[in-house]
Image (cartoon, coloured by chain):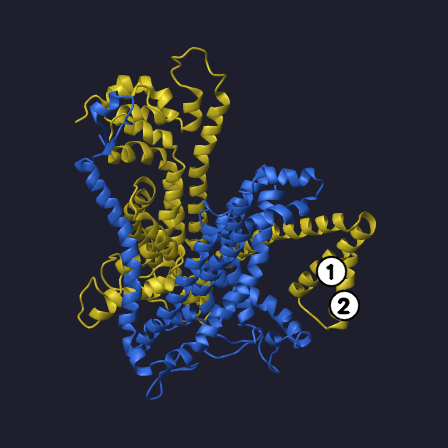
Chain colours: A blue, B yellow
């Protein structure tokens, strides 16, 4: 009996009934259990940060601030020189490539599902997006490594030959074009695509039908309606979805560790073989000696911080925007 | 057509490009341009813009489909080659580096995967459901931070989860040889829990939110406690949705590789005890074999990938089936319902039938703990959100 009313109040017409919430014992246990599991998530996330910090102390003590500014990762020299900068730039580059490719495509897919597809194909495509998200990243990596890589290489070569005025497209003479950050970015973009597509779909589908009909009634074409009504309405969702995708792309591990050579370096040339990302590098060095592991923990901490920040900003943007109030990410 | 021809001219003659992928991309953009120009010439720029965008947007949908089919086809073709019944009954014990791809099998990986995922499930499901209930059914001020943290945790890189478990449970006890605090399947399950918990929580929460508020209010108005109404009304209503969420969660957990690198570590032999010593799992098996330089190992890796993919697709199909089952039944039910029968004492009001899944009214009446006859009487009104006569409920006040 959670809700009681005082008998006296119920019968007098003037004063409103006072509702008192008196939880029973079962309810209290229920409250504690559910709140406890909610709290657990909070505690877990804090612990992740804390423990990574704790275990990475060796590496941070050794290299100090230069951990953030050094490019190389060498444990074979004394004292060891490890730094996260080369990994960090690679991580960001791959993620940015992935998101630049995935955002237009994902937005188009979201638009198609809400505004172009008809009933049956709509539910089919929605399922397809979910399925794309369910395919393990390992399989994407496998496919990218064994099949896609060789198909993209000629395109990279062509881009390098004809687009070298654009700095990222420069490549050294005789460089190999497989195992490049472009290919890694492409494969990661496939993994990010479903997230962006489902967020934008959700947002677009909440566009008030009245506004859409008004635009159509005023004589606009379908594209005019989308441009003037749907896209402005869904802008917050598109930005938030992209940020969310960026967060995923930053943390993508297995596919990238298969595709890139994982040699930390400071390079902007995305077409040729080279590059490393934090997550992929950690995966590749699993089971190393104590000091390396401590360095990996420090790198993991950096990655953890970045993805956490990106995701938090993303969810704030989505929930603040006009369209995103009820959206589930 | 003209686009393909023009592309061929520009792409291969003028810039010496090669490779069909580049050709396709270039042809697509040339097509878009030509199509836009032609329509603009004949029907005006407005129509041209509309049509070009239609094509572009449709492409977005096609791009979703193509890689999936391509990927599945590729894995199936490559994986079937070395797929033998032996794959499901043997492990990699005694397999030489020079052995053919069909030697040995992946039993150890399959068993490891199943055990780890089962352990993960045992830990994740109660926690996730409790957290989702906390987020949706209680009115604590504390919900907002928890929701933000669940959101943030769902973006946690999987490798960091593995690293965390390694840092907490394995690394400090590395030299002490404590069975459970070393590389083993249970540690893998812990790491997988960290990945799976937030995703399942959020899906379950969405499902719980779909339960009509009127049902909760009806249950509370009938005198059930809050815990009781969640247990007997909200959860049974959301059962299919929760099941779907869990199955999708399994599909994700089965394919995770990164957290296992630091926890289960991988092993070539069958190890059925997930609490002691390192253990193999399907993704790890694929990951290690695929990087090998021997053709046979790569082929074995593809077979493992095929089994993994089949598993994921099957789980996904199951989830879709469960999810669809409910909506299908609901729709059929809705169609069968005629116009509201006249008279105030209609036994099942159309509102109640439409707003709630079919089996629910009985569940409320039988299980909520209130006296059944009066509960059944009040039902039609209860479903709209109000109890029929509040006085009888409030009589036993303090």
Question: If you read the primary sequence from the N terminus, does the residue marked by circle 1 or circle 2 appear first?
Answer: 2
Which secondary structure, mark 1?
helix
- Crowding at dot 1, Cα within 10 Å, few <14 / some 14-19 / many 20+, comes out as some
Residue A110: % across, % down:
56, 49
Q: Is residue A314 above or below residue B47?
A: below
Q: Are marks 1 and 2 on the same chain?
A: yes
Q: Indicate whether B113 appears above or below A159.
A: above
Question: Which residue has dot 1 on it?
Answer: B30
Residue A303 position in % (x across, y down):
39, 68
Residue A24 vs residue A113, the one in the foreground: A24
Residue drawn at (79%, 49%), measured in percent from left and top? B44
Residue at (82%, 52%) from the top-left corner?
B41
Instruction: Tell me the quadrant of the picture where the N terminus of chain A can be found.
Output: top left
Which numbered disc, 1 or 2, marks the residue closer to the eye?
Answer: 1
Q: Chain of mark 2?
A: B
Residue at numbered disc 2? B10
Residue A55 image offset from top left, x and y in percent: 27, 72
SS at circle 2? helix
Q: Residues within 10 Å of mark 2 (few under 14, many from 20)?
A: some
Q: Chain of mark 1?
A: B
Determine which of the numbered discs, if any, sits on residue A2 in the image. none
* Residue name at image x 26 percent, y 65 percent: B183
Q: CA distance from mark 1 to mark 2?
A: 10 Å
């Amino acid at each position: 009996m959670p809700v009681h009313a005082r008998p006296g109040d119920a019968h007098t017409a003037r004063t409103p009934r006072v509702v008192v919430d008196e939880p029973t014992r079962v309810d209290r246990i229920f409250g504690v259990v559910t709140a406890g599991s909610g709290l657990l998530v909070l505690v877990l996330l804090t612990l992740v940060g804390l423990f990574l910090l704790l275990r990475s102390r060796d590496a941070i003590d050794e290299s100090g601030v230069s951990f953030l500014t050094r490019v190389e990762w060498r444990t074979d020299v004394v004292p060891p020189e490890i730094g996260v900068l080369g990994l960090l730039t690679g991580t960001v580059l791959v993620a940015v490539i992935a998101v630049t490719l995935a955002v237009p495509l994902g937005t188009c897919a979201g638009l198609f599902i809400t505004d172009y597809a008809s009933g049956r194909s709509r539910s089919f495509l929605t399922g397809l997006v979910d399925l794309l998200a369910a395919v393990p990243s390992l399989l994407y990596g496998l496919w990218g490594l064994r099949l896609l890589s060789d198909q993209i290489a000629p395109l990279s070569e062509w881009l390098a030959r004809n687009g070298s005025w654009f700095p990222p497209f420069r490549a050294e003479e005789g460089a190999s074009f497989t195992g490049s950050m472009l290919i890694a970015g492409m494969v990661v973009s496939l993994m990010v695509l479903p997230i962006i597509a489902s967020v934008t779909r959700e947002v677009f589908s909440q566009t008030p039908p009245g506004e859409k009909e008004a635009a159509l009634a005023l004589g606009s074409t379908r594209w005019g309606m989308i441009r003037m009504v749907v896209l402005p309405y869904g802008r917050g969702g598109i930005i938030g979805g992209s940020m969310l995708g960026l967060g995923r792309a930053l943390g993508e591990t297995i596919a990238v560790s298969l595709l890139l050579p994982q040699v930390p370096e400071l390079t902007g040339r995305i077409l040729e073989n080279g590059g490393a990302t934090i997550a992929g590098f950690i995966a590749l060095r699993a089971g190393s000696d104590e000091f390396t592991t401590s360095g990996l923990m420090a790198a993991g901490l950096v990655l953890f911080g970045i993805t956490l920040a990106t995701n938090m900003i993303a969810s704030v943007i989505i929930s603040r925007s006009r369209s995103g109030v009820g959206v589930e990410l | 057509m003209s686009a393909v021809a023009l592309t061929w001219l520009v792409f291969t003659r003028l810039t010496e490009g090669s490779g069909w992928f580049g050709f396709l991309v270039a042809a697509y953009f040339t097509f878009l341009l030509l199509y836009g120009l032609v329509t603009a010439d004949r029907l005006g720029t407005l129509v041209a813009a509309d049509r070009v965008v239609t094509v572009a947007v449709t492409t977005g949908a096609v791009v979703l489909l193509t890689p999936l089919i391509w990927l599945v086809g590729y894995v199936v073709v490559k994986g079937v080659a070395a797929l033998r019944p032996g794959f499901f009954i043997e492990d990699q014990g005694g397999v030489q580096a020079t052995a053919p791809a069909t030697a040995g099998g992946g039993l150890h990986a399959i068993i490891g995967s199943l055990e780890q995922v089962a352990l993960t499930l045992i830990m994740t499901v109660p926690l996730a459901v409790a957290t989702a209930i906390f987020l949706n059914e209680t009115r604590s001020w504390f919900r907002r931070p928890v929701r933000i943290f669940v959101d943030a945790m769902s973006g946690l890189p999987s490798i960091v989860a593995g690293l965390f478990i390694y840092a907490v449970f394995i690394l400090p006890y590395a030299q002490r040889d404590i069975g459970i605090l070393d590389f083993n399947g249970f540690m893998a399950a812990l790491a997988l829990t960290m990945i799976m918990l937030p995703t399942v929580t959020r899906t379950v929460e969405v499902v719980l939110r779909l339960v009509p508020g009127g049902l909760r209010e009806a249950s509370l108005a009938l005198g059930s406690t809050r815990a009781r109404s969640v247990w007997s009304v909200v959860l049974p209503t959301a059962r299919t949705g929760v099941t779907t969420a869990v199955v999708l969660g399994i599909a994700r957990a089965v394919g995770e590789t990164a957290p296992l690198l630091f926890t289960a570590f991988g092993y070539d032999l069958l190890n059925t005890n997930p609490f002691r010593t390192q253990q193999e799992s399907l993704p790890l098996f694929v990951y290690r074999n695929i990087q090998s330089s021997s053709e046979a190992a790569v082929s074995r890796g593809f077979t493992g990938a095929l089994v993994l993919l089949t598993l994921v697709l099957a789980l996904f199909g199951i989830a879709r089936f469960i999810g669809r089952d409910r909506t299908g039944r609901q729709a059929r039910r809705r169609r069968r319902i005629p116009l509201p029968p006249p008279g105030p004492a209609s036994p099942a009001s159309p509102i109640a039938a439409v707003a709630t899944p079919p089996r629910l009214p009985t569940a409320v009446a039988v299980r909520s703990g209130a006296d059944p006859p009066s509960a059944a009487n009040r039902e039609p009104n209860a479903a709209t959100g109000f109890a029929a006569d509040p006085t009888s409920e409030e009589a036993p006040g303090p």
